[in-house]
Image: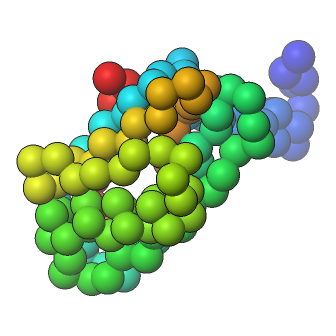
Amino acid sequence: MLQRSGSTKVPVLIALLMMLTTAAAWAAPSNKWRIQVSSDADSDGVVVFRIAPTDAPPVDITVPIPKDAGENHIARLIRDSLRAKLGDRYKVEVDDGEDVLVKKHHGSKDFELAITQKTAAGVRITLDRE
């Protein structure tokens, strides 16, 4: 599909990379996810999470992160933002200070969790299915 013309190679490659990145961002659905926060924020920014139940449209949750926030503070900000946006559809709690657990309620469908944007420099966030 790549053409020899130098002017069309770059846009095609960019489009392919974007599709691969988007596909890789989603993991298989799970009934519980662990959000692990590492390092402090070097700048103000946001982290945007997308929760996608297998039986409903996805929900985006934006978490503002202030500069110099520590990992425990960031975990509490994530917990509070998820609770405010999701209500009682999920159980959201902090675990070990710097981790956030997101669990479906009994009888609910599994869900996918992804980070769609992160602008807070220095903060590392990983998502693990449990």
**Residue 104 spot, x, y in % from top left:** 47, 34
Left or right, 1 with respect to 71, comes to right
What is the quadrant of residue 40 in the picture?
bottom left
Kindly give the residue lying farthest to the front in the view shown: 106
Report the number of discs.
0
Kindly give the residue lying farthest to the left in the view shown: 96
**Residue 114 spot, x, y in % from top left:** 52, 41
Residue 24 visible in the shown view:
no
What is the quadrant of residue 44 in the picture?
bottom left
Left or right, 105 with respect to 69, comes to right
* Image quadrant where one finds the C terminus: top left
* Image quadrant where one finds the N terminus: top right
**Residue 27 spot, x, y in % from top left:** 52, 24
**Residue 26 spot, x, y in % from top left:** 57, 29
- Residue 109 versus residue 51: which sits nearer the camera? 109
Left or right, 110 with respect to 100, comes to right
- Residue 84 versus residue 13: which sits nearer the camera? 84
Q: Residue at x 40, y 46 (%)?
A: 91
Q: Residue at x 32, y 82 (%)?
A: 66
Q: Residue at x 54, y 19 (%)?
A: 28
Residue 36 visible in the shown view:
yes
What is the quadrant of residue 83 in the picture?
bottom left
